[in-house]
Amino acid sequence: MTSSPDRPLDGSGKTLLDYPRPSVAVDTALLTVHDGALKVLLVRRPGPGEGWALPGTFVHPGERLADAVLRSLREKAGVTGRSPHQLHVFDEPDRDNRGWVLSVAHVDVVPEAALIGSAVTAPRAKPQPVIELVEIDAIDSMDLPYDHGQIIGHAVTHIRGNYKTSPDPGGLLTGPFTLKELREVHESVLGEPLQRDTFRRTMERQLSATGAMSDGTKGRPAALFVSRGAT
Amino acid sequence: MTSSPDRPLDGSGKTLLDYPRPSVAVDTALLTVHDGALKVLLVRRPGPGEGWALPGTFVHPGERLADAVLRSLREKAGVTGRSPHQLHVFDEPDRDNRGWVLSVAHVDVVPEAALIGSAVTAPRAKPQPVIELVEIDAIDSMDLPYDHGQIIGHAVTHIRGNYKTSPDPGGLLTGPFTLKELREVHESVLGEPLQRDTFRRTMERQLSATGAMSDGTKGRPAALFVSRGAT
DNA sequence: TTGTTTTAGCGCATAAATGCGCAAATTTGT
DNA sequence: ACAAATTTGCGCATTTATGCGCTAAAACAA
């Protein structure tokens, strides 16, 4: 490829395109809660190097990293409407046998309900599913490619840190929720039980009561809340 | 450039080199404490687009991001022996008029003593210095290029977070130190006074007394400490 | 020897945080 | 009407954290 005539030349009379450049990929640990446990979404890689991996893609020209993440989640997993957060750039020069590839790891959280209609729940006409949710504790025994195991570790640490102080920062609960629902989703993410009063005191100042009560339950209906400042 | 014959082909018969790729740069906010204030190291950019900026460079093939950071600190500022931490990838497609450039922002901390002999303190034979230390509060009025102002903001937040809980995690104090010296360097980084007893209680469990006392002072000599787990 | 200087340990009052048992409140079921 | 179920507010004891004045300790100066 020849130099672009409309780009500035440097001190050696060259443009950026005259120098070797890496391919840049994005990989995303998409976390959700299913059956009371924190899980990560894996996709099946076809062809050589097949197996389970995090959804990812190479970044296209003119594309933001987050846009590449969103494209890969849609194309590989049928998931839309996320807002990924950068974690770390994995830069081992020989991490990919195809050549020099940097991977910008991301993390995002998705409510289980948003996976309805995605490849997770599509009828399994094929003998093997293209996507699955895997419990965090089962990742170590899966032999994922590249640094995907490390990416998941980073992601879990990051998200659990957020869940220590803020009410459902990942938006796992859609719509108003009760204090008990909030605590339970936090317990699922953090993987440990939480003391009811301590949890309530931490969260209540960041919540707004909706004035409505939960319904359809035997026993005292619980008050419904939304997060303050949540859109 | 033609495809490399020894690299795997993808489903379209192409290698990675057949696809457009961005240039990847690293930029580093190198922080230090000087005269009791937190400062960032800026370097002078020659030629077009001259002015002050964070030290940075393009990543070379086979090079880790941290190695590129170290190379840029050595070449642009004469600083060696650091261990940079990744902060964030700045990925605005048009952030650089030379073409598609991603910048991986880093942060590191350097003791003022390690700048001795670097370009900071070299005799100023030229009419303009090539390097300077700028107080954090003065950055907003400097009109730095690209996203360097944001990088500095991220870096300061990150480092100040570390200094809230750990004794001198950036290694600004070289060798054993007194509790007062430790507190003073923390106050310089955080930009606010700290309560003596509260600070001591937070830090003392992460410190080992050396058994030695400071000397050469009038008044009671203070005990000397090192951080636990510090190399 | 005494006084001054400097550092920091500590007693203590106060404030804040935590965890738990109890029961008020509000529903459904009989 | 009463019982059962469920949620959660709260009183309270306990634990933990904070800030400050006082002074012990160990140096140097006179």
Image (cartoon, coloured by chain):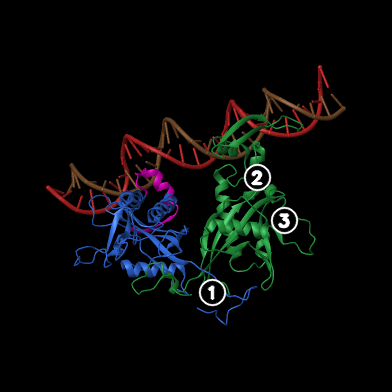
Chain colours: A green, B blue, C brown, D red
Q: Which residues are magenta?
A: B190-212
Badge 3 density bin: few <14, some 14–19, many ≥20, Cα 10 Å: many
Q: Which residue is mark 2?
A: A185
Q: Which residue is mark 1?
A: B17
Relative side of A141 to B192, left or right? right
Q: Is residue B211 magenta?
A: yes
Per the rendering, the mark at residue A87 is none
Write the residue at 53% across / 74% down: B17
Q: Is residue A64 magenta?
A: no
- The answer to whether any part of residue B231 appears in the image is no
Q: Chain of mark 3?
A: A
- The image position of residue A129, as x and y in percent, is 75, 61
Disc 1 residue type (three-letter): Leu
Badge 2 density bin: few <14, some 14–19, many ≥20, Cα 10 Å: many
- Estimate the spatial distance between the alpha carbons at disc 1 and disc 2, rounded to whole Å: 45 Å
- The image position of residue B152, as x and y in percent, is 38, 54
Q: Nearest the camera: C22 or A168?
A: A168
- The answer to whether any part of residue B181 appears in the image is yes
